[in-house]
Amino acid sequence: MGKWRYNPITLLKDVSELRFAELLDDKEFIETYETISGEFDEYMAAAANPKPPRIAYFSMEYGLNDNLKIFSGGLGILAGDYMKEASDSNVDMFGVGLLYRHGYFRQKLSVHGEQLSEYLPQRFSNLPISAVKDDNGNWLEVSVVFPGRTVFARIWRVRVGRINMYLLDTDYEKNDDDDRQISYQLYGGDNENRLRQEMILGIGGIRLIRLLKLQPEIYHVNEGHAAFIGLERLRVLMHERGLTFSESLDYIRASTLFTTHTPVPAGHDVFDEDLMRTYMSHYPGRFNISWEEFMNFGKATPGDKKFSMSYLAANFAQEINGVSLLHGQVSREIFHNLYHEFLPEELHVSYATNGVHYKTWTAPAWQDFYEKHMGKDVEAWLSDSDQWKQLQQVAPAEIWELRQNQRRLLIEYLHKRVRKHWVSRFENPKNMITVLDNMKPEALTIAFARRFATYKRAHLLFKNPQRLAEIVNNPNMPVQFIFAGKAHPNDKAGQDLIKHIVEMSRQPEFLGKIVFLENYDISLAQKLVQGVDIWLNTPTRPLEASGTSGMKAVLNGVLHYSVLDGWWVEGYKKGGGWALPKERTYQNQDFQDELDSESLYATLENEIIPMFYKRNTAGVPEQWVSFIKKSISEIAPQFTTRRMMHDYYSRFYHKLAERTSLLRADSYGRLAQLNKWKKYISSRWKEVAMLDIKTAKPDSDPAQTGDIIRMKIAMNLNGIQPGDIRLELIITENFFGRRELINIEEAAWVNESNGIDNFEISTRLHEPGTINYALRVVPHHEMIPYKADFNLVKWL
C-alpha cells in the first residue's frame, strides 16, 4: 500500500492507463473487484434509511486515518472512530469541523533527543475530500464577521461510509493573509487565533448547516471548542423564528448535548474579557441583553475575569457527560460552580464511556479469529457479551500462536522504522546494529504510547535505572519497552521527558531494550496495539478522563496494566490484566510516584514476567493465555464504539429528541407556556419564605440510627401553587470537610389556611455517623428535565 494507504485519490493518480488495461484482462482481479464493489454497494444501500434522530456532531478534530491530518491525539481519534461507528450503525448523523492546511505537527527527534516540530502543508487536491458546490457549480461558503472585516470559509465534504463530514477552510484568496492562517494549524497560533478558529467552527458551522439545509434535531458538542454554536442558534431563533430570548435558550438547551473530555484545567479553553469584547461586542445587542449578562454565559461567578468555553457549552446544553464513569464524577465537581446551590451528587452531569472502532483497530488475524469462533455476521455478536464468553473455550495454543505472529510482525516493522529514522538522524550506526540485534520477536514486549504530558507519568519506569536494567537484561526472561508519543509544542516539561527517555535508551544497558519511536500516528498506533504483549498506562489519578489506546489493545489479545483511572476503573477484572491501586497513599506527589514505581517494578518482576515465560511442554504459557481469554471475552466487548453509540442514544439522544419535539408542538406553544410559568415563578420567588417549623425530637438524644425525624413547616409561597414547588429535606454527612449527600426527602403538602401552606415530612435515619440536614425549596414543573435546569433554589 505504501503512500497510497487509504487514499484512492493518490492511488488513481499514480496508476497508468496501461496498468488499468492490464487489470481489465486480469480475471482474478476483476472477480475480487466485483466482490468488494458488491459488498460496498450493499453496505451503502442501507444509508437510505438511517436511524433517527438527525444529529449534528461538532468537533475541532477528527482522526480518520493518517492521510487527512486534522487530528492531534485522543480527542480526534475518538471523534473519528465515532464517525465510523455512525456509518456502521447507520444512524442519522453528520460531522462538522475544520480543514487544516498544515494539520498538527509532525514529530522528529534530533540527534540529541529533542522533539522537533515539522508543519507540512496538505495538498487538498490529493485528499479524499470534495468541494461542496451549488447547482451552478459555485463553491459554497459561509462568512463570519470579525473586527473590521468579514472572514469567509469554504465548505468541503468527506464521505465516511454512509455519513458525511463537512469541513470549513479559510485558506483561500477571498481572505487576507492573517485570516487565511486561521485554518493553517490544528491548535496553532496564539489564544486569539484559537478564538478565531472556534468562531469559525461554531458560528460558521451553524451557518453551514443552514446553507445546506441539513436540519438536525440534536446538536452534539464534542468538547467546548464548538460552544459558539449556541450563540448563532440563539440569533436564528430570535430573529428568524420570532422566539424570545428565554424561549430560544430553553429550546437550544433541550436539543444540545455537551461532552467534556478532560479533568485537566489546561484542557478547557478560556479567553480574556478584552479579547471577547474585541470580537463579540455586538452580540449582546442581538439578544437584547447587557454585556455582563452575555459574559456570564462563560463564567461560574460574575466576578470571574475569564470566559470559559466549557462553561458556555454547559450553559447551552441540557445534557452534559464525561467520557467514563469516574470522569463523570470528576466533571460534576468541575461544573459544580455553575449550580452551586446543589450538591455535586445531584447534578445532571452523566457519562458515556468511550469506545473504539472494532474494524479500525483489530488486526485482520484477530478479526478472522473472532469470526471463526463467533460467526461471520459481526453485527450480530459485536455487542453481545454472551457471545464473547464462548471464547473461553478456545484452545490456548491457537491464541498463543496468534499472539506470537502479531509480535513477530510488529518487530519486523519496528526494525524497518528504526533503521529509517536512525539513518535520517545520522545516529551512530554501531548503536543502530546493536538496537536491531537486541530487539527480539520472542521477548516480552511492553508499550507506553500516548500524548507526553507530565501527568501521564512516563518517568515512573525510570525511577530506579539499575533495577530496570536488571529486568530488561535477564537472559532467561528478556523484556523490551517501546515508547512513542508527542508532547505539545508549548509543553517544555513533556518535551524534556521525551528527551530523558531517548537519552536513557542510548545507554549501553538499554540499547534495543528501550526504544522511543518518533512521530506517533494512527498507523504506528495500529501496529503497537496489535503487536505488543502489555499496554502500560500510569497516569496521575483522576487526570485520565478515559483513555482509549488500552481498549484497542485488549481487542488484540494485549493485556492492560494501568492505574485504576479512566476506563480501566470499569474495565479491570482480576485475572484479565493488572492495576496499580486507585487509592492515594501520599499527598506529596513525589512520594506517590516513588510508591507507584516500586509497585510497577514488583508486579513486573513477581507476576508478569514469570507468568509470560512459564510454558507447558508444548511451549504455551497457559496462565498468560487464560488472562488473554478473560480480557477478550469479558473486557473487550464492553469498550467498542458500538456499545458507546448505544449509550449515547439510550441516555441522551432519544431523551433530547423527545423533549425538543414536545417544545416544538403547537408552533412552540408548549415552549411559550413553560417560559410564561418560569417568569411567574421568578417574579414571586424572592418573597417565598418559611414562617414556622416544628420538629419532633427523635426517640433518643442524640439521634441514633433508626430514629425518625418529623417536621411540620408553614410556608408563605407568595401566590405560587404548592404543586409548582418541592420542599425538600437534604440530609448530608461531613466527610473530611466536604458535604456528602445521604438522602433527599420530599415534604408532603397538608393544607392551606389563611394564605399559609402547611407541609409535613417524616424520615428515618438509616446511616450511622454525624449528619446534617437542611430544608430548601426548588421549583417543579413536568417539563423541567432536572432541578438545576431551572436554577432557582431557596434554602430555609
Image (cartoon, helix red, strand yellow):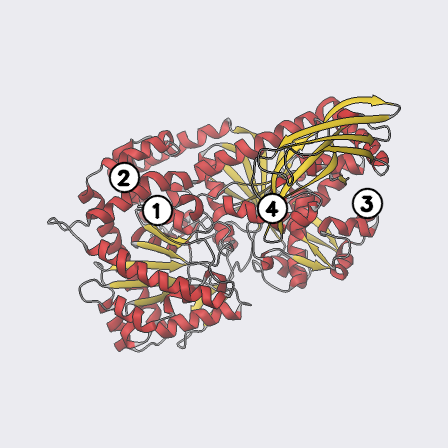
Residue 466 left/right relative to 301: left
Residue shown at 54% from the left, 43% from the top: 165
Q: How many angstroms separate mark 2 from mark 1 (CA)? A: 16 Å
Mark 1–mark 3 CB contact (< 8 Å): no
Mark 4 and mark 1 residues within 8 Å of each other at the beta carbon: no
Is 356 situated above or below 437?
above
Near-viewer residue (284 or 87): 284
Q: Which mark is residue 189?
A: none
Q: Judge whether 135 appears above or below 123 on screen.
A: above
Under circle 4, the secondary element is: helix
Label located before the other in sequence (4 or 3) = 3
Q: Which residue is mark 4?
A: 332
Q: Residue furthest right?
A: 754
- How many residues crowd mark 2 within 10 Å: few (<14), some (14–19), many (20+)? some
Between marks 4 and 3, how big is the CA–CA gap? 32 Å
Amino acid at circle 4:
Arg
Q: Which mark is residue 554?
A: 1
Can residue 749 be seen here? The reply is: yes
- Residue beneath the point at 50% across and 58% down: 122
Identity of the residue drawn at 61% across and 33% down: 707
Query: Could you tell which of marks 1 and 3 lies nearer the N-terminus?
Result: 3
- Residue in the foreground of this view, choosing between 199 and 688: 688
SS at mark 2 in the image: helix
Question: Dot 4: within a 10 Å radius of its alpha carbon, few (fewer than 14), some, or many (20 or more) residues?
Answer: many
Alpha-carbon distance for marks 2 and 3?
58 Å
Secondary-structure class at tag 1: helix
Query: Spatial distance from mark 4 to mark 1, Cα to Cα?
Result: 29 Å
Q: How many marks?
A: 4
Q: Is residue 66 left or right of residue 729?
A: left
Residue that numbered label 3 is attached to: 286
